[in-house]
Image (tube, grey):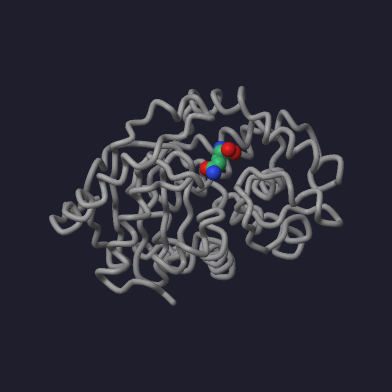
């Protein structure tokens, strides 16, 4: 794939980069603590095949919570909308992404939405397949289709690091198992979830995924339908309402582009019918979003009047 480096984008990246020192890299998953907080990169892939990038584009990182939009798409294809949303809600929350509080409040117990950990764990639990290997393979196949990059794998190091330390996520799973939101073996679910979160990409891969979502599930080059249009729409809607955790409202006002972040510092954006964006900047704010990544999107949105609202 041919991709131009854009001096205009380079200039914005260098204007946003100083904000990296206001945040810090996630280290509750020990392997993520090794990231270089100064890194910042962006790729933008347009419908017509044009592609621009700037910054540390060669850096790879793990999907973390960005995987939540992809597992959601997969389970809706597996089970249909009605079944999936009988297990997990559609409402945003003002609580942090790993909070357990609302699970106990809702009767019958149901995670508020698929973008917080409880909801994402319930979604991963629904992925069809008889083994972790098969279920993860199905998710990777979807990602290979969306990115046109079949070399994408998961990082064993990051997956193991999270698996060993994910007791809060285990607690969410056991709570949900007691309340029949999830079924089966919790350790097996943790194995699959931590591997899904550890899938390793670069900002171009993210931009390609964003592009397919922006293009209503269709690969703009081949014309192939990868996700049904209705699923692409649901994913974009969750990105708008819940994609930036409990900062989604502020982000909608300041940027106004459907986006999803992860604690590795990735942000994916899907500008409807126009382009996909992939950003990497591992220095995070208190909520767990890339601090310079958000600044960069704010600058882009302001300069080119990109808010969809
Ligand atoms: N794997 C991470 C976790 O469950 C994903 C969280 C995130 O990116 N916000 O804690």
1 vs 298: above or below: above
Q: Quadrant of the C terminus?
A: bottom left
Q: Which image quadrant is residue 121 in?
A: top right
4 vs 30: above or below: below
Do we see residue 101 in this rendering?
yes
Do we see residue 207 in this rendering?
no
Residue 90, image x, y percentages? 67, 63
Q: Quadrant of ligand 1?
A: top right
285 vs 131: above or below: below
Q: Residue at x 37, y 65 (%)?
A: 220
Residue 256, image x, y percentages? 42, 68
Relative placement, left or right, of 279 versus 28 is: left
Q: Which image quadrant is residue 86 in?
A: bottom right
Q: Residue at x 30, y 59 (%)?
A: 45
292 vs 164: above or below: below
Marks counted in the figure total 0
Extreme residue in the bottom direction = 309
Q: Residue at x 81, y 48 (%)?
A: 104
Q: Nearer the viewer, residue 131 or 171?
A: 171
Extreme residue in the left direction = 7
Q: Which image quadrant is residue 21 in?
A: top left
Q: Nearer the viewer, residue 199 or 118?
A: 118
Residue 239, image x, y percentages? 52, 61
Relative placement, left or right, of 157 versus 123 is: left
Residue 122, image x, y percentages? 71, 47
């Amino acid at each position: 794939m041919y991709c131009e480096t854009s001096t205009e984008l380079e200039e914005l990246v260098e204007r946003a980069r100083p904000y990296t020192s206001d945040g810090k890299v996630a280290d509750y998953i020990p392997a993520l603590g090794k990231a270089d907080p100064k890194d910042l990169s962006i790729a933008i892939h347009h419908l017509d095949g044009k592609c621009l990038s700037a910054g540390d584009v060669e850096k790879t990182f793990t999907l973390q919570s960005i995987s939540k939009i992809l597992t959601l798409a997969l389970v809706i294809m597996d089970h249909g909308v009605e079944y999936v949303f009988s297990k997990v809600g559609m409402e945003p929350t003002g609580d942090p992404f790993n909070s357990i509080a609302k699970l106990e409040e809702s009767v019958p117990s149901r995670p508020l939405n698929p973008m917080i950990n409880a909801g994402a764990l319930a979604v991963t639990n629904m992925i069809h397949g008889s083994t972790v290997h098969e279920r993860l393979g199905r998710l990777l196949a979807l990602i290979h289709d969306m990115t046109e990059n079949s070399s994408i794998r998961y990082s064993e190091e990051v997956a193991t690091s999270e698996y060993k330390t994910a007791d809060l996520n285990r607690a969410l799973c056991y709570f949900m198992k007691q309340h029949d939101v999830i079924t089966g073996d919790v350790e097996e679910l943790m194995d699959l979830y931590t591997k899904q979160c550890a899938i390793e990409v670069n900002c171009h891969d993210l931009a390609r995924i964003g592009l397919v979502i922006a293009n209503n599930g269709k690969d703009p080059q081949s014309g192939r339908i990868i996700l049904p249009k209705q699923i692409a729409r649901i994913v974009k809607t969750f990105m708008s309402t819940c994609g930036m955790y409990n900062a989604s409202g502020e982000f909608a006002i300041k940027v106004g582009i459907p986006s999803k972040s992860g604690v590795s510092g990735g942000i994916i954006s899907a500008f409807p019918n126009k382009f996909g964006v992939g950003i990497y900047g591992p220095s995070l704010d208190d909520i767990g979003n890339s601090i310079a990544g958000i600044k960069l999107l704010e600058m882009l949105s302001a300069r080119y009047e990109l808010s969809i609202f």
